[in-house]
Image (cartoon, grey):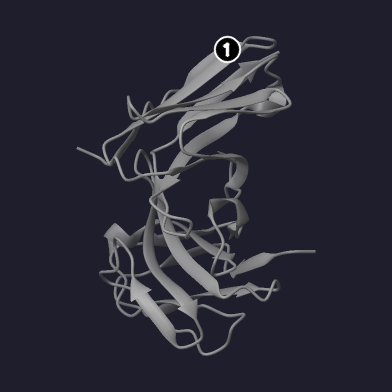
């Protein structure tokens, strides 16, 4: 079954404590990305990766890092989380040449920073 | 002004009603238009995908794009309680993966 798997699904953490949200896909997709979803703002792209070792900033990259050492994994790193990073995060993947109709989303990670 | 505007709702309709969901946008370079459905605590799933202007129908769903007015719509016929979800429009300039999303409209279909 085609899947994008995120962990953890729910997390409460404190300001400044580094955390990593993992993302893994089993479809051999080249393209992976991270979004955050906030009420009334839809999904905003944080970072994306066109392939292994190739990453670039999206619309709201401040406070986040990513890495793409393997094709299937694309972790999102918050080095020093702050309360304004409290949000719902989605990982997505697709083939590099795909259009919107081939993007698969994970089930989301609810992050609360206190 | 946001690049893609979408009425947040909530929109509440009785079962069987025709639902109209809309987005307006400002970037005339958008060519690819999508509608995603998102159930509570789930990731978005693609409902409809259209290229340029025109209509596309899939079962009870019809997507319309009017590029001259920078306006897209999703119609749901014979709405069902299972259609209750948040609907997100998304669009992109080229056949890639850089999507710009609207804020989403929450729809509630009451039995």
Q: Residue A50: give x, y in percent of width and height.
A: 47, 75
Q: Nearer the viewer, residue B46 or A66?
A: B46
* Left or right of A45 in this view: A51: right
Circle 1 residues within 10 Å: few <14, some 14–19, many ≥20 = some
Q: Nearer the viewer, residue A4 or A99?
A: A99
Query: Is residue A53 something that shows in the picture?
Result: yes
Q: Which element carries disc 1, helix, strand or loop? A: strand
**Quadrant into which the N terminus of chain B falls:** top left
User: Which residue does the image show at 62% across and 73% down from the upper left?
Assistant: A29
- Residue occupied by mark 1: B13
Q: Residue B62: give x, y in percent of width and height.
A: 61, 25
**Quadrant into which the C terminus of chain B falls:** top right
User: Which residue does the image show at 41% across and 59% down from the upper left?
Assistant: A112
Q: Residue A38: give x, y in percent of width and height.
A: 38, 47
- Tell me if residue B110 comes above or below residue A38 in the rendering: above
Q: How many marks?
A: 1
Asked where in the image residue A17 lies, by quadrant, the reply is bottom left
Residue found at the very far right of the displayed protein: A1
* Left or right of B44 in this view: B52: left
Q: Residue A65: give x, y in percent of width and height.
A: 35, 78
Q: Nearer the viewer, residue A104 or A91?
A: A104
Q: Nearer the viewer, residue B14 or B102?
A: B102
Query: Is residue A65 something that shows in the picture?
Result: no
User: Which residue does the image show at 63% across and 9% down from the upper left?
Assistant: B17
- Chain under disc 1: B
């Amino acid at each position: 079954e085609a899947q994008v798997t995120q962990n953890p699904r729910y997390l409460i953490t404190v300001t400044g404590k580094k955390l990593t949200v993992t993302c893994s896909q089993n479809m051999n997709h080249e393209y992976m990305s991270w979004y955050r979803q906030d009420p009334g703002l839809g999904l905003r792209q944080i970072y994306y990766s066109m392939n292994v070792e190739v990453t670039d900033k999206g619309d709201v990259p401040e406070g986040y890092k990513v890495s793409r050492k393997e094709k299937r994994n694309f972790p999102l790193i918050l080095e020093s989380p702050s309360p304004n990073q409290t949000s719902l995060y989605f990982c997505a993947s697709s083939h590099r040449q795909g259009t919107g109709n081939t993007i698969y989303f994970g089930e989301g990670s609810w992050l609360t920073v206190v | 002004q946001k690049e893609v505007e979408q009425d947040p709702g909530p929109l509440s309709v009785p079962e069987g009603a025709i639902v109209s969901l809309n987005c307006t946008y400002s970037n005339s370079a958008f060519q690819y238009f999508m509608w995603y459905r998102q159930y509570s605590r789930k990731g978005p799933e693609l409902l409809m995908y259209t290229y340029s202007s025109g209509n596309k129908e899939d079962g009870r769903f019809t997507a319309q794009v009017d590029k001259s007015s920078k306006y897209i719509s999703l119609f749901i016929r014979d709405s069902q309680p299972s259609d209750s979800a948040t609907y997100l429009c998304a669009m992109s300039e080229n056949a890639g993966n850089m999507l710009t999303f609207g804020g989403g409209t929450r729809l509630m279909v009451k039995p």
